[in-house]
Image (cartoon, rainbow, N blue to C red):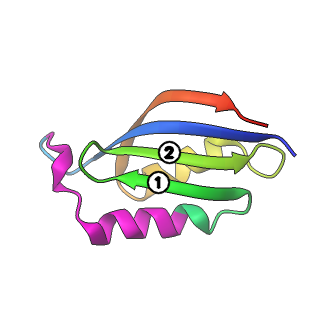
Amino acid sequence: MTIEKVTLNALKKDCSGCRTCATDYEADNLKHALLRLNGVSKVNVDKVTGKITITYDKQKILQTKITERVEKLGYKIELISGVEIQ
């Protein structure tokens, strides 16, 4: 098992630039959608900063599949960091 933790900057595509527009509902939906992906074990969504931290098993899912899911949910994303933790 190869565990990686990645942090993404997420901004709603239909937003004028304010990251604080995310509601608890949107953050919960994003978290739930990512946790449903096979291989994703932990998701933290900071609705104030727009940062999403995702812990996943690289042998079960590719990072591109995770970022595709976030984009399909209506977010523009930017990779902040990624680190292998196990």
Secondary structure character of the magenta stretch overall: helix
What residue sits right under mark 1 in the picture? 44
Image coords of residue 74 (percent x, y): 35, 55
The secondary structure type at the circle numbered 2 is: strand
The secondary structure type at the circle numbered 1 is: strand
Image coords of residue 58 (percent x, y): 77, 43
- Rendered image: mark on residue 16: none
Mark nearer the N terminus (1 vs 2):
1
Residue 12 falls left or right of residue 43: left
Between 31 and 61, the residue placed more toward the observer is 31
Is 28 a magenta residue?
Answer: yes
Are discs 1 and 2 less than 8 Å apart at CB? yes
What residue sits right under mark 2 in the picture? 53
Vertical relation: 29 (above or below) 71: below
Given the image, on which type of amino acid does mark 1 rest? Asn
Given the image, on which type of amino acid does mark 2 rest? Thr
In the image, the segment drawn in magenta is: 17-33
Between 76 and 29, the residue placed more toward the observer is 29
**Quadrant of residue 62 within the rendered picture:** top right
| Quadrant, the C terminus | top right
Q: Residues within 10 Å of mark 1 (few under 14, many from 20)?
A: some
Residue 81 falls left or right of residue 13: right
Task: Look at 27% across and 42% down and name the residue there.
Answer: 49
Residue 77 falls left or right of residue 65: left
Task: Look at 23% across and 58% down and name the residue there.
Answer: 22
Image coords of residue 27 (percent x, y): 35, 63
